[in-house]
Image: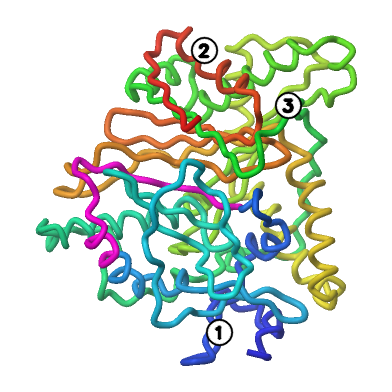
């Protein structure tokens, strides 16, 4: 594997697979290239997608299903390795993760830099099957695609006839080369202007939870009324929910004592990931998402909720655009091709990655809100699934982030937090109940 450190020499190719046979390996996609330097026991970059079934999970059948679908996703059957200049992914041939019992604190303690460790895992508890992926491997789209495949195979082993199922990756199929491509490189354009660097954002002060703890609070909301309310405000569901998040941040900001408030950054900003497969043609199962940053400037005064929704709507409609996103792709891919970056030894690349991510990443947003959208499953699989959940990765800087996912007639909003305070979650769901939504709340703490 000595030649693995030469991976950047092949950057013109968008496919991430290199070599053949026993010498096969994968280049990290552009979004993942800096991520290994950011991970530790707490900031794992691990997120979760889970499905709750009608019947209790049979562990023997689940283990067989995990093994059966493993080879359908060879680009996930890898461990993280490194050379002198770059991280890369090396296949763990002939192996598959063993399902493990679920933990009270999801998304924690995945030590991805240890030898022989997969970058994803499958967990089970009662009737719930959860998959947890490190973002080095994929984004929410890829994780959901894997979970659908796992559910189909598990239910087949439990006696369901899935012969007519379409639209799901099934064992025995050969993966298409496009599934492991670096779609950022496929859609990279040179000589585009760089996007503006966002201003530093407000981060609300809060004591952290104890080490190893990660609080998850999930609210279940009827989907139809939520869609109707978003339409009433002239927005999409995502824009409406992001507006509720921003309104909650604004309440927290103005609840701070004036002397403390004057020391804080005045910009309230939410990172909203965008699935780029909706803008650019791609079948990749690796990372292919970037983000936009709707924000409020508190120096201009207090924003009423309808005003927040209008601002978020017009911002999102303008920014979620091929031309604007292409500038981000150009900056990110072009930065990796910089000759100075290429010749830096890996430890120095890690230092640079942490500095750049803090300034261009977590410094610029107060929190994250990601909506994976409605899950679609064919029958008879859909009849056996009661709900889906989507939990964000832990963040030490922003502390509290939120994800949303819809299944049938219910919207599930999951907050993941390293903060001892539950003020953001409380204000968010209080805003929804104040609008007349019945909200069912559950928590792991």
Q: Position of residue 72 (x, y in %)?
A: 34, 72
State left or right for residue 78 relative to residue 263. Answer: left
- Identify the mark nearer the N-term, 1 or 2: 1
Q: Which residue is at 38% across, 52% downward? A: 101
Label 3 packing within 10 angstroms: few (<14), some (14-19), many (20+): few
Q: Is residue 433 above or below residue 164?
A: above
Classify the position of the N terminus by image quarter: bottom right
Residue placed under numbered mark 3 in the picture: 206
* Highlighted range, magenta: 45-65
Label 1 packing within 10 angstroms: few (<14), some (14-19), many (20+): some
Depth check, front residue: 296 or 102? 102
Badge 1 vs badge 2, beta-carbon distance below 8 Å: no
Q: Position of residue 246 (x, y in %)?
A: 63, 22
Residue 244, numbered label: none
Q: Position of residue 168 (x, y in %)?
A: 28, 59
3D distance between C-alphas at marks 2 and 3: 20 Å
Residue 52 part of the magenta-drawn span: yes
3D distance between C-alphas at marks 1 and 2: 51 Å
3D distance between C-alphas at marks 3 and 1: 46 Å
Pair 1/2: label in front: 2
- Identify the mark nearer the N-term, 2 or 3: 3
Residue placed under numbered mark 2 in the picture: 430
Pair 2/3: label in front: 3
Q: Position of residue 45 (x, y in %)?
A: 60, 52
Q: Is residue 77 above or below residue 23?
A: above
- Identify the mark nearer the N-term, 3 or 1: 1
Count the labels in the image: 3
Residue 251 part of the magenta-drawn span: no
Residue placed under numbered mark 1 in the picture: 18
Q: Is residue 174 above or below residue 308?
A: below
Label 2 packing within 10 angstroms: few (<14), some (14-19), many (20+): some
Q: Quadrant of residue 65?
A: bottom left
């Amino acid at each position: 594997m000595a030649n693995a450190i030469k991976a950047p020499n092949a950057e013109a190719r968008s496919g991430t697979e290199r070599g053949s046979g026993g010498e096969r390996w994968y280049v990290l996609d552009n979004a993942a290239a800096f991520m290994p330097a950011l991970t530790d026991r707490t900031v794992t970059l691990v997120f979760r997608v889970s499905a709750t079934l009608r019947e209790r999970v049979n562990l023997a059948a689940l283990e067989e299903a995990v093994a059966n679908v493993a080879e359908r996703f060879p680009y996930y059957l890898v461990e993280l390795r490194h050379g002198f200049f770059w991280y890369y992914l090396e296949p763990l041939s002939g192996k598959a993760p063993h399902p493990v019992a679920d933990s009270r604190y999801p998304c924690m303690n995945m030590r991805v830099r240890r030898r022989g460790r997969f970058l994803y895992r499958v967990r089970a508890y009662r009737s719930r099957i959860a998959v947890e992926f490190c973002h080095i491997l994929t984004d929410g789209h890829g994780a959901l695609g894997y979970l659908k495949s796992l559910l189909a195979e598990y239910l087949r082993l439990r006696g369901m006839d899935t012969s007519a199922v379409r639209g799901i990756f099934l064992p025995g199929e050969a993966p298409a080369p496009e599934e492991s491509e670096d779609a950022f490189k496929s859609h990279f354009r040179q000589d585009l202007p760089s996007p503006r660097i966002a201003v530093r954002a407000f981060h609300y002060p809060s004591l952290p939870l104890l080490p190893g703890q990660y609080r998850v609070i999930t609210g279940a909301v009827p989907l139809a009324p939520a869609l109707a309310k978003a339409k009433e405000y002239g927005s999409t569901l995502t824009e409406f929910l992001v507006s509720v998040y921003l309104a909650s941040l604004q309440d927290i900001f103005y609840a701070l004592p004036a002397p403390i408030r004057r020391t804080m950054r005045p910009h309230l900003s939410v990172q909203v990931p965008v699935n780029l497969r909706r803008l650019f043609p791609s079948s990749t199962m690796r990372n292919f998402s970037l983000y936009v940053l709707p924000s409020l400037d508190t120096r201009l005064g207090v924003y009423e909720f309808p005003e927040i929704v209008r601002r978020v709507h017009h911002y999102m409609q303008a920014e979620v655009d091929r031309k604007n996103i292409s500038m981000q792709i150009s900056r990110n891919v072009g930065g990796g091709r910089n000759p100075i970056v290429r010749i830096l030894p890996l430890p120095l690349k890690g230092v640079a990655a942490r500095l750049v991510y803090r300034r261009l990443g977590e410094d610029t947003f107060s929190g994250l809100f990601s909506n994976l959208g409605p899950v679609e499953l064919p029958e008879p699989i859909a009849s056996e699934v009661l709900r889906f959940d989507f939990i964000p990765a832990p963040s030490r800087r922003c502390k509290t982030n939120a994800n949303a996912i819809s299944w049938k007639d219910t919207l599930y909003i999951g907050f993941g937090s390293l903060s001892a305070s539950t003020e953001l979650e409380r204000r968010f769901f209080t805003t929804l109940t104040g609008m007349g939504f019945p909200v069912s709340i559950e928590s792991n703490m």
